[in-house]
Image: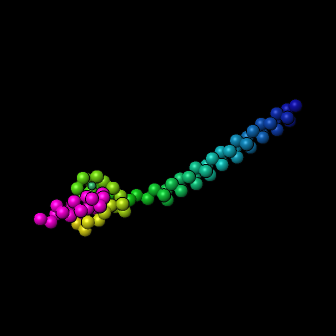
Amino acid sequence: MTKFWLLVIAVIVIFLVMRLARNRRVKRQASETTGKAAAPEEMVPCEVCGIHLPRSEAHNGGHAYFCSEEHLHCGIGKRQP
Ligand SMILES: [Zn+2]
């Protein structure tokens, strides 16, 4: 009867060790993928309204950045008398 309980305990221990190893592998893979995806991007302010947005989404007016086409024309109009 003792052998039976030793076998049961051994099976439980093996199951827990395999589960722990799998969890560690999943966490490591998740951190690797999020680390690659979360590259920081420079934020730039709109010259007209001051809202900050990623440089790749901003409209470049040469001297400054703008949040939209409308503010791009608005901002350029302000600069030229
Ligand atoms: Zn704006």
Residue 65 within the segment the image draws in magenta: yes
Q: Is residue 10 left or right of residue 58?
A: right
Q: Is residue 54 above or below residue 3?
A: below
Residue projecting furthest to the left: 81
Q: Can residue 7 be seen at all in this image of the molecule?
A: yes
Residue ID at (16%, 63%)? 79
Residue ID at (75%, 39%)? 12
What is the span of residues highlighted in magenta in the rendered image?
64-81
Q: Is residue 70 above or below residue 4?
A: below
Residue ID at (70%, 46%)? 18
- Secondary structure mostly seen in magenta is helix
Residue 30 percent coordinates (x, y): 56, 52
Residue projecting furthest to the bottom: 62
Q: Is residue 16 above or below residue 36?
A: above
Q: Can residue 66 be seen at all in this image of the molecule?
A: no
Residue 31 percent coordinates (x, y): 53, 53
Q: Quadrant of the C terminus?
A: bottom left
**Colour scheme of the rendered structure:** rainbow
Q: Which sits in the foreground, 68 or 57?
A: 68
Residue 6 within the segment the image draws in magenta: no
Quadrant of ligand 1: it is bottom left
Q: How many marks?
A: 0
Please identify the quarter of the rendering in which residue 67 is found.
Answer: bottom left
Q: Is residue 19 left or right of residue 75?
A: right
Residue 38 percent coordinates (x, y): 46, 56
Q: Quadrant of the N terminus?
A: top right
Residue projecting furthest to the right: 1
Q: Which sits in the foreground, 81 or 61?
A: 81
Q: Which sits in the foreground, 6 or 22?
A: 22
